[in-house]
Image (cartoon, helix red, strand yellow):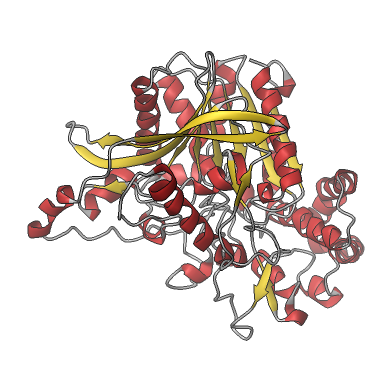
Amino acid sequence: MNALARLPRGMVAPCAVLGLAALCTFPAAAQKDHNPSSAAPSAAAPAAPASAQADYNKLPPLPPDKSIDQSVVVDGRTLHYTVTVGTLPVRQPDGKVAGELVYTAYTIDQPDRPVTFAVNGGPGASSVFLNFGAIGPKHLDGIGNKNDSASEPIHFSDNQGTWLGFTDLVFLDPIGTGFSRSLVDPAQAKKLFFGPVSDVNYLSEAIYDWLVKNGRLTSRKYMVGESYGGYRVPRIVYELQSQLGVAMNGEVLVSPYMNPTVESHGDLSPLPWMLTLPPITAANLERQGKLTPEAMQSVIAYDEGDYATALIKGNSDPALQQAMIQKVTEMTGLDPTFVKESGGRLETEAYLREVWREQGKVGSVYDSNVTMYDPFPWSPWPKANDPLLASMVGPTTTAMVNFVTQTVGWKTDAQYYALSYAVNAAWDRSNPAMREGSVTQLRDAIAADPEFRVVIAHGWDDLSCPFMGSVLTVNEMPVMGDPTRVSVHEFPGGHMFYTREASRVAFQKIVEDMYSKH
């Protein structure tokens, strides 16, 4: 989900920085403590004893690549495709295999097909969320929405929002997620796999290797990344373009964690509060059945105008402050005392408890209208897992393991990790690249190729990777040729807005239009 997004007062958002298929960061409840310095570098994993280090390369081998034929009916049209589950070796500089990356590919045997590589985020999330939730040919029903139960039987439907009609799809599971695994000791794995630079390097090489292995270097090539995948993708695309000589045609960023600079310094800058007000207002409008693009345009106009002015002026203009607090109360439907005591500055964790407090529930940072009962209502901080994650990880894990081992027949008894808290805990957050984001690489890719295109998509209700972060970031980018080459779109829903079929299909049409421009 998210791990590095804006974390007011120490919150670790499951999606904003981590990037689960909708992940950005794992929730604070999953951490060992609730220290606001949770973004500080974690201690390096201790090296394995010398007697044990040789065992890492003696793990039971993963199965050879396996393919089966399947079909899906999309908008009345039957697509026949091949599913392949396979592995790519990840090598150290000396050529020794240090890990095995497992991928799931959906391909159609037709000439001139584009190919799209997909990654989720976390760090620590597998690609199952984009696969079964958003763009793969089969959609896992009953996940990610209000009142969904984690214990209901697994059920798939033909995904009417799949991208398979216009591109082949390759879902990559980074090392330590899915079935992908390290073959070196923990200290070496941390160095090779669990940091922002090494992560981008080996994933870029894996994409290159897949293209060569499958004879697809001359195909049109795209990437899609969700949450922390929105950090990965611009950097991977830049690495492919500038270092590996692989020209990419475009990228799609889903609820991306992309620009940390808009999410910090809430004591001085209005930006952090400008990010939270619109999704909180969207959630309130949705509860009233009034959420429309037109309604949200007026919300954004207030956010970028009078609200920003009031935040900047602060207590130097008491009348303006009072008018702002009254307006925020009306927009959000929150208790007037809560808004007044917050100074109209709505901190995410406090809001997620306050909005459902009378019902004894807590909202999800990914979509505050997805709730569960708060098992620790008197705790000074949220202690439970995020409501949306709590309902998604079980079904997605079950569905993926059953699909891979039973449907495809890629037989393994290895552990599958839809979300790996171990990877998230081992991640090197001390690297300056974590604080830089990926906007520089995004701009470089756009500037280097006049045909390169970017689609950025968000859910209105997402507080882990708020849509205003992308809106404000793109607003500040220079126009490089055709201004439509970079576009930001919002849909009903939260971080994983694609769990709603109408939003998923609308998103698909926008992306298909982008692909058609090449």
Q: Residue at x 17, y 35 (%)?
A: 96
Vertical placement of residue 141 versus 447, above or below: below
Q: Position of residue 117 (x, y in %)?
A: 49, 32
Q: Position of residue 105 (x, y in %)?
A: 45, 34
Q: Residue at x 19, y 51 (%)?
A: 59
Q: Which image quarter holds the N terminus?
A: bottom right
Left or right of 51 on screen, residue 403: right
Q: Looking at the image, which is closer to me, 372 or 403?
A: 403
Q: Looking at the image, which is closer to me, 467 or 394?
A: 394
Q: Position of residue 365 (x, y in %)?
A: 64, 61
Left or right of 15 on screen, residue 509: right
Residue 124 visible from this viewpoint: no
Determine the image quadrant of residue 319: bottom right
Q: Residue furthest left?
A: 51
Residue 210 visible from this viewpoint: yes
Q: Which image quarter holds the C terminus?
A: top right
Q: Position of residue 50 (x, y in %)?
A: 8, 57
Left or right of 102 on screen, residue 513: right
Determine the image quadrant of residue 363: bottom right
